[in-house]
Image (spheres, rainbow, N blue to C red):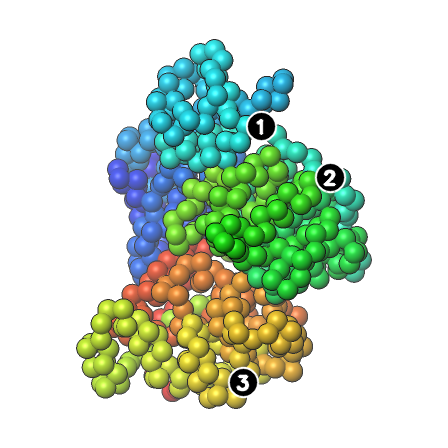
């Protein structure tokens, strides 16, 4: 295919791809490129993507082939694709599936290669050799029975991702069906996500916040009809999952257990927090027995991008059980995306935010970065501070308080979340706005009461810490004002914007504001957050704080 002389992309030999943001075809190019490339930088005019091995393998696992990826580049590229890039994509994608983990007729775990040379290469690695039991012919080894997960991790590090076809235990059967009272039904993309998951048996479904990831989990449970362990981020999330299960499935209260710091119930469907699973006593995981308490046929990992590192180790021993990861982003701040790929499974379904928004399933959102000038005295204090103190000084600048007041006034009558990172700042904001606050120290019952009053509209402004980032259902929130955050975390940006994306009865659009102290590290970190939103197809409008008060 000839290059498009007026296309929006430039593909470079180092596997970076430049996207001209203002080009009329930029949105279509971004949509197609996101299947296999990761956005690295997103300044105003040119966005930089990188084609990585893991990105290519995730795309291959989700059903895309090398020819289709190369065709995307050719369709939008201004210049000819470097030959080295097309060869590299073809060969990298071709590595997926050259090694297959299966079971033989006797139930033994085996590793089979398409050719003897690949097998010889990987068995020279000491860490792989220790996981293999005996050789059977030129292409096959028997694998240690316990080593299925660890083997996949090691092979990925060597650049040879194995396709796992060894099957899964069905678990103990348990009748679960969806309850469609009220006329609700799974959306087409949710049905497709469930179908893709069961076609492979394990893996990750990537959907934006507000697009119904929980319903995908419920649909997967109804399809599997088996005992299910659901792992979630916190107790509030656990109770929201339980409420959804009672509302939308045929499960009863007696069939659903909560296993958290407060309650220890094991039932056919059990919801546990990551914290309880990773709790230690005398150096040992105190609640590890939960993983084998019942013959689980399905394990669901909510917000899989937040999976604590110890849970990866525990998950390595759960490879015979179907595993479903749910997330809005595969980005992990600790860089362990490869462990998600190996131990939970590759990406099986991905629907971009803007695509679901266009279908009317999530609310449209406008994103703004409001830049604030620090007074001279604050600038001098900032300049004289140590590097590790500067972000806090910039993020908690008192000058932000007046801007928050202006924005709350501008959106009077709407439901507004004011989000901060630092507890003293949250106290100041709550006092200044005469609004209730919610932090990690707020008791669970009090949190649920505040959330419910916010949903009903008796509270219209709620000041929250990062505890509200995850798995909180506040569909009528239309405005979020992010005053400070976790050093430009892309994960956090996904979650915070996600608070606004659920469809609203009011029909009001969503507005997402980030307050940034100009010419500080606060502004530097903001560029990292912008990168995530640009990756999802959202543009940032940069405003000056003085313009808000005008």
Q: Is mark 1 on a helix, strand or loop?
A: loop
Q: Which residue is drawn at 39% across and 54% down?
A: 333
Between 550 and 15, which is closer to the camera in this rendering? 15
Pick whichever of labels 2 and 3 is earlier in the sequence. 2
Q: How dense is the environment of label 2, judged by Cα within 10 Å: few (below 14), some, or many (20 and up)?
A: some
Q: Between tags 1 and 2, which lies in front?
A: 2
From where the camera sits, is residue 33 visible?
no
Q: Residue at x 33, y 74 (%)?
A: 392
Instruction: Give the spatial CA distance, label 1 vs label 2.
Output: 19 Å
Residue at label 2?
A: 172
Q: Residue at x 46, y 20 (%)?
A: 113
Residue at label 3?
A: 435
Residue at label 1?
A: 166
Between 266 and 209, which is closer to the camera in this rendering? 266
Q: Where is residue 341 in the image (x, y as percent from the top left)?
A: 47, 40
Q: Is mark 3 on a helix, strand or loop?
A: loop
Instruction: Give the spatial CA distance, label 3 vs label 1.
Output: 55 Å
Dots 2, 3 in contact, CB < 8 A: no
The N terminus: image quadrant: top left
Between 418 and 4, which is closer to the camera in this rendering? 418
Dots 1, 2 in contact, CB < 8 A: no
Pick whichever of labels 1 and 2 is earlier in the sequence. 1
Instruction: Give the spatial CA distance, label 2 vs label 3.
Output: 48 Å
Q: Position of residue 235 (x, y in %)?
A: 61, 63
Pick whichever of labels 3 and 1 is earlier in the sequence. 1
Q: What element carries label 2?
A: loop
Q: Where is residue 95 in the image (x, y as percent from the top left)?
A: 41, 27
Q: Residue at x 40, y 69 (%)?
A: 485
């Amino acid at each position: 295919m000839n290059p498009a002389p007026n296309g929006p992309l430039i593909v470079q030999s180092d596997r970076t791809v430049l996207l001209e943001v203002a080009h009329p075809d930029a949105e279509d190019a971004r949509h197609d490129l996101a299947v296999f490339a990761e956005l690295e930088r997103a300044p105003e005019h040119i966005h930089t993507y990188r084609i990585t091995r893991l990105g290519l393998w995730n795309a291959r696992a989700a059903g895309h082939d090398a020819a289709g990826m190369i065709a995307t580049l050719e369709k939008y590229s201004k210049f000819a694709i470097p030959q080295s890039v097309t060869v590299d994509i073809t060969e990298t994608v071709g590595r997926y599936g050259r090694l297959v983990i299966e079971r033989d007729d006797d139930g033994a775990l085996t590793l089979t290669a398409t050719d003897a040379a690949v097998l010889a290469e990987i068995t020279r690695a000491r860490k792989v050799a220790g996981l293999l039991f005996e050789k059977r012919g030129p292409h096959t080894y028997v694998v240690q029975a316990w080593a299925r997960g660890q083997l996949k991790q090691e092979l990925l590090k060597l650049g040879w991702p194995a396709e796992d076809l060894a099957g899964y235990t069905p678990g103990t059967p348990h009748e679960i069906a969806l309850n469609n009272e009220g006329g609700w039904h799974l959306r087409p993309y949710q049905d497709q996500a469930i179908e893709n998951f069961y076609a492979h048996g394990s893996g990750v479904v990537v959907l934006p916040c507000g697009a119904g990831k929980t319903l995908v989990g419920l649909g997967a449970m109804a399809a599997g009809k088996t005992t299910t362990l659901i792992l979630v981020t916190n107790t509030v999330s656990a109770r929201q999952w339980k409420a959804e299960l009672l509302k939308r499935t045929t499960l009863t209260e007696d069939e659903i257990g909560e296993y958290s710091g407060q309650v220890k119930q094991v039932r056919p469907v059990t919801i546990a927090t990551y914290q309880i699973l990773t709790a230690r006593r005398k150096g040992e995981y105190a609640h590890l027995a939960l993983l084998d308490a019942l013959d689980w046929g399905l394990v669901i990992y909510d917000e899989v991008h937040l999976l604590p590192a110890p849970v990866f180790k525990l998950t390595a021993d759960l490879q015979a059980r179907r595993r479903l990861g749910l997330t809005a982003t595969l980005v992990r701040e600790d860089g362990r995306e490869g462990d998600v790929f190996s131990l939970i499974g590759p990406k099986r379904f991905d629907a971009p935010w803007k695509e679901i928004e266009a279908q009317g399933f999530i609310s449209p959102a406008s994103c703004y970065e409001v830049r604030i000038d620090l007074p001279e005295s604050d600038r001098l204090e900032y300049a004289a501070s140590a590097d590790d103190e500067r972000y806090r000084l910039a993020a908690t600048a008192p000058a932000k308080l007046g801007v928050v007041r202006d924005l709350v006034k501008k959106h009077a009558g709407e439901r507004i979340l004011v989000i901060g990172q630092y507890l003293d700042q949250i106290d100041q904001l709550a006092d200044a706005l005469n609004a209730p606050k919610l932090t990690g120290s707020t008791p669970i019952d009090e949190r649920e009461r505040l959330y419910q009053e916010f949903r009903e509209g008796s509270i219209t402004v709620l000041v929250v810490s990062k505890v509200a980032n995850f798995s909180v259902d506040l569909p009528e929130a239309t405005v979020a004002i992010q005053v400070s955050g976790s050093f430009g975390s892309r994960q956090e940006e996904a979650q915070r914007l996600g608070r606004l994306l659920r469809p609203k009865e009011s029909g009001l659009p969503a507005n997402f504001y980030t307050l940034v102290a100009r010419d500080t590290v606060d502004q530097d970190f903001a560029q990292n957050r912008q990168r995530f939103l640009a990756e999802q197809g959202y543009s940032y409008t940069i405003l000056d704080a003085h313009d808000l008060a005008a």
